[in-house]
Each structure stands twice: as C-alpha cells, then as structure tokens.
Amino acid sequence: MLLFSGALNAVCLVPEQGQLQPHSIEKIYDGDTVHTVGGEKVRLVGFNTPEVGRGQRPAEPLAKRATQRLRALLGVPPKIVLKGATEQRDRYGRVLAYGFTPQGEDIAATLIEEGLAFAIVVPPNLWNSDCYVGAQQQAREAGHGVWGHSAYQPQPLGQIHHGGFQRIRGRVKRVDWSNEWLWLDMEQDVSAQIKHSDLPYFEGQLDLEALQGKVITLQGWLVPRKRGYRLRLRHPSAIKVE
C-alpha cells in the first residue's frame, strides 16, 4: 500500500496488517534499539540515531533526545509494532525489523524527519527507503537536529580521529577495481569500497567512474585500518556529490 505524505513530500509505504506483529517493550537501549518482553533485542531498520554513552565513552550529541523521542512514541507502558525485514538478523545476531507505533506511525520516518536520525539504506532491506531518504533531505534542508549541529557536519579527511558512524568530505583521487570491489581512493588514506554485488543499486543513479576528481560527502561507518580508514558503501543515498 502507498501513502502520499504531504509532510515529507514523498511517497511512503504502509505495511499490510498481516505483516505486522505487536510487542510489549522490556527495554529501550537508545533511539534505534529495543528489547521486547520475552523476546529478543531488535535493531530497528532504516535509520541510525546518535550513540548513547557506554562505559568510558560519552554520549554523542542528541543521543538522549533521540532516545527520549522513541520512548515518547512508544507510550506508557511502551509498545511497538514490528514488520520483519528481508534480511532478518544483523552480524550481531539482533533481529532486524521496521518499527511502528501502536497508532501506525512509522518510527524511522518520524525520527529522520525531526533530525534525530540519519537515513540508512542497507540492501536487501530496501522497503520504504525512498520515504526515509526523502525525509532526510527535508530535515537537512530545514537544518533540523543533527543537520544543524556542529558535531554532525562533514569532517574533512585530515580531521578524522576515530571510527564509527560519521559524515566525511573529501576528494576522490582514483576510482579502481579489484576482483570483488570498486574502490574510491581518497586523500589522507581514506577509501570507500563498493562490493560488486551492490553495484546494481548504483546503476542509473550515480556514475561511479565519473567521481574521480570530484569532492564528495559520504555517510556511514568508518573502520580504522593500519593506515587510514575504510568505509563500505551499500547504496547511492550514502553519497552526495558537490
């Protein structure tokens, strides 16, 4: 089912009732992860919120607001309605699912539109991705939440000091190919990689070969290497060309 959302200026999908399962919530970890009563840890699909503090690691800016907003959406006592994702678990063993309030509000679209989350598209979980990317574009243009906060402005490549989810900006020095990957080699020993199996998602959306010499902004999880950093790209929505 399709729903035109005037607020988002995007076509958003509404799941069929038979795809939905209601759950009570035992614990809310942060803005995108919960634990259901008598169930499992669930990573909500389609978005990523700032990380809460753990141990010696301080909370990222707006993490508390995102968690509080999710708590408000789920009500008292907290309840959530889940739609299973195509890829059912992540590499940590968590259940992957799309989340909705008991009233049917799409949690991902709401948090993204309010600037409390980034849109994340990870194939094969593509359901409603156009809606989420559209919500992010609107939030970015309005400067809501993360988009108006200095901590989430794109980091120049020479100012990267740690891994994790970030937005980075720099010039592509070279586009290269290996047996399994397409590489975007950037300055400061930073590389972005796209697996050949993900290339169909970029076809007709972005000319990757033409990125050589261009300044781009990337959004995703940086992994520290012996020299520099690496970031895997799964979908063209993670790349903005200047």
Image: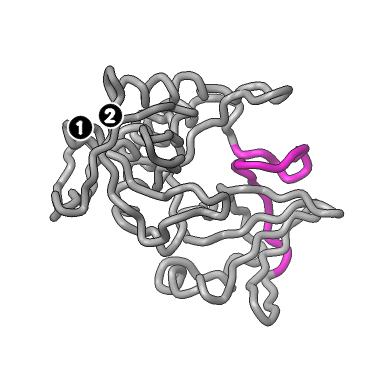
Image quadrant assignment for residue 105: top left
In front of the other: 199 or 223: 223
**What is the secondary structure assignment of the residue under circle 1?**
loop
For label 2, the residue is 79
In front of the other: 20 or 202: 20
For label 1, the residue is 102
In the rendered image of this protein, does residue 209 appear above or below residue 73? below
Q: Residue at x 45, y 43 (%)?
A: 43
Q: Which residues are magenta?
A: 154-174
In three-dimensional space, the C-alpha distance between marks 1 and 2, rounded to whole angstroms, equals 7 Å
Residue farthest toward the bottom in the current orientation of the protein: 179
Residue 194 position within the rendered picture, expressed as x and y whole percent measured from the top left = 59, 67
Q: Residue at x 45, y 36 (%)?
A: 33
Residue 50 left/right relative to 35: right
Residue 104 left/right relative to 150: left
Residue 64 left/right relative to 194: left
Q: How is the image coloured?
A: one colour
Contact, CB < 8 Å: mark 1 with mark 2?
Answer: yes
Identify which amino acid the numbered label 2 is placed on: Lys
In front of the other: 56 or 127: 56
Residue 74 position within the rendered picture, expressed as x and y whole percent measured from the top left = 29, 26
